[in-house]
Image: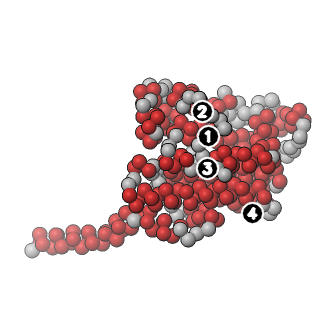
Amino acid sequence: MKHHLIVFLIYITHLALLPALQAELNDSSAVAKEFASLSDEQVLLRIQGGAWLKLPALSEVTGDEGQRVVMLAKMVLKALAHEARVLPNLTDSTTLLNRTLRVASVSQVATSQGGYLNDLIAVSADQVFLLGAWTVIDRSPKLAPKLMSAIKARGKLTSPKAWFLERYQLDLDLVAKKDAIVAMAPDATGYQAVVSIQKKGRDANNLPTVFDQISTPEIAFLWWAVYTTDYRMVVLQAGITYVEGHGKFTENMNVFRANCASIFGKAKLPFTHELKRGSIYPEDIWDSWNAARDALVQHRQVEQWFGK
């Protein structure tokens, strides 16, 4: 009798867990169904609120699941592309700040959920955040310190060797270069890593868009985007600190250098990134500020990453 009771209890427990297990299995289906009716802005709002899931590479899923993850990834990337084109044209400074912080949240949520397609979403959101952040600095410098929380919320960049070892199998070109990746020095810089395994003879005027990378992963290219975006975040932090120190932007580079020396107390700034051999300079801040103010540069950068 006691044995039958135990079996019955196990059966009842199993039945109780079935809805939760089924919900977990149908996550992508439920999210896809909900998101299909949302506008671009609503998509970003829902992800900002944490309504998201892991999005693996296409090679890791099949059938309907593969179609759903592609649909979801494209939906978010489309919303981010729209945001990149809208942010520079916003006239209300508070709205500009809030929407800029929203795309930073999208990056954080995508990163926390994981998966190759979320890698694409996260780095795309980071690039849109950078565009919005420099627009805030240019137009409403008093709001610039409010951007710092988004920068500090970012995790530390993984070593390139560890990053590639986790993802190289998604890229057939890199599968053939497995030995080079395994032999990579543990302390190899991001630049050294990508130079040793990237495609040769790439046409700078014909780079893959983020949408191309959904179906055809180019992991070395993605790493370079992640790596340089990490550098640009450090430059942004330096720019925010410059503004907090009551620094003014000027069209004259020599005047700007003098302003930086006055605020930071030396020619080199107290910010480092290995891409620039450990130093961030006034020119880095000045170039980023100018790029965000140039509509043609903005347009070219957005088209190059998201496509037309």
Label 2 sits on a secondary structure element that is loop
Pointer 2 residue: 202
Q: Nearer the viewer, residue 291 or 152?
A: 291
Mark 2 to mark 3 CA distance (whole Å): 21 Å
Residue at figure coordinates x 60%, y 46% from the top left: 209
Pointer 1 residue: 207
Left or right of 251 in this view: 297: left
Mark 4 to mark 1 CA distance (whole Å): 33 Å
Q: Mark 1 touching mark 3, by CB under 8 A? A: no
The image position of residue 298, as x and y in percent, is: 74, 48
Mark 1 to mark 3 CA distance (whole Å): 15 Å
Q: Nearer the viewer, residue 77 or 159?
A: 77
Pointer 4 residue: 95
Residue type of the residue flagged with mark 1:
Leu
Pointer 3 residue: 124
Mark 1 to mark 2 CA distance (whole Å): 8 Å
The image's colouring method is: secondary structure
